[in-house]
Amino acid sequence: MAKVEGHADAPFESLRTLLEEQIASGDELGASIVLNIDGKNVLDIWGGFFDEEKTKPWEKDTVVNVWSSTKTVATLAALIQVDRGQLDLDAPVSKYWPEFAENGKEGVLVRHFLSHTSGVSGWKDPITPEEVQDLSISVPRLAKQAPFWPPGTASGYHAVVMGHLIGELIRRTSGKPMKQFVAEEIAGPLGADFQVGALEKDWPRISPVIPPPPSPIDFSTLDKNSPTFLSLGNPPMDARIANTPSWRRTDMTGVNGTANARSLVRVLSIITLGGTIDGKKYLSPQTIEKIFEEQANGPDLVVGVPLRFGTGYGLTGGGTSQTIDWLPKGKVCFWGGWGGSLIIMDLERKVTFSYTMNKMGAGILGNVNSEKYLKAVYKALGVEGY
């Protein structure tokens, strides 16, 4: 049996046992779990296997494609630009990206990109996976098309396009592509092992993702003009695309971050800890407060379930608690990735928690394992209801 390595402070040893059980049962292949409380990693464990054939162990520095957990870094980058006065959440996107005003999008605000409410949740016309990865093709297409619903009136999960949209704002306001901005302004200063895509020298330590069970959505029966089809089914995406060189070379902070739980916790604890880490200020408390200003709360037009969004992150409570009832209550923001990865920022308890893995489970927001680990953490913390 693959051993679970790393350290766990006494109250959290149960997580090590749980991860060992999940690996032994086959529910988990390889994974990394980190819990930070008030700036200290009280749990940092990893274990299982790097590959489906179980020929190599998941090591301390193993990383994996974390799908939509990458979005948490895209929105952090935007908030850093807001904090610097380079972006205004209430300004039209066209102030920074004039071409975007085409086709009735002049009313789309920067905040709409960060809350999945822009109406531009996918590509209107058929697009190939190769074209999605070529920003010179995929980004101008988004600027040209009309919104799928009136901007600001509802959320519709920006499944793949979120990184294309926010990335273009970062490029226009900082002069740097998102990949470079994240490397130089966030991951580099923090010493975090997080990349948008991945440098070729790091490919040998990227664990290949194992695709999830088939989607419960039958795309062949959907209206081809519905936000769900256009956002999740255009183009159809095989998870194994994340294991390809072209995916690792591109710059899509909606879906192609390479990380483990330790690096996600390091980056996102900026939010939990008030914006300053190791004496370096990334965000002001005032900008962090904007995260918790509700932007949408109700049935999401793409995923079809109730969700509550603040500025840049999902918020617990409201519609979200009907959909994911195991998330903690209070001043908590979060997001997860296709197949199960998860990052939680609990500001009241100064808790940052993340889980990443290679064997993808069912669902686009957490999986059964994410739920088990998070419940075990909050039970160990003595939080009522767990």
Image (cartoon, rainbow, N blue to C red):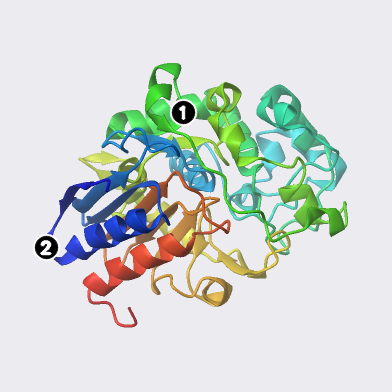
User: For the residue marked with disc 2, what is the amino acid?
Assistant: Ala
In the rendered structure, find residue 224 and report the number of the disc placed on it. none
Is 292 drawn above or below residue 326 in the view shown? Answer: above
Coordinates of residue 5 in the picture (x, y in percent):
20, 45
Coordinates of residue 385 in the picture (x, y in percent):
34, 82
> What residue sits 75% from the left and 56% below the top?
151
Is 179 drawn above or below residue 230 in the view shown? Answer: above
User: For the residue marked with disc 1, what is the amino acid?
Assistant: Phe
In the rendered structure, find residue 10 and report the number of the disc placed on it. 2
Task: Kindly give the residue lying farthest to the bottom in the view shown.
Answer: 385
Query: Front-most of 266 and 51?
Result: 51
Q: Is residue 169 visible?
A: no
Disc 1 and disc 2 in contact, CB within 8 angstroms: no
Coordinates of residue 356 in the picture (x, y in percent):
40, 48
Query: Front-most of 200 and 263?
Result: 200
> What residue sits 62% from the left and 43% below the top?
162
In the rendered structure, find residue 181 and report the number of the disc placed on it. 1
| Label 1 secondary element | helix
Q: Earlier in the sequence, mark 1 or mark 2?
A: 2
| Label 2 secondary element | helix
Task: Kindly give the residue lying farthest to the left in the view shown.
Answer: 10
- Residue 196 is left or right of residue 260, and the answer is right
Count every numbered label the image shows and give the total: 2
Q: How far separated are the C-alphas under marks 1 and 2?
A: 38 Å
Query: Front-most of 88 and 358?
Result: 358
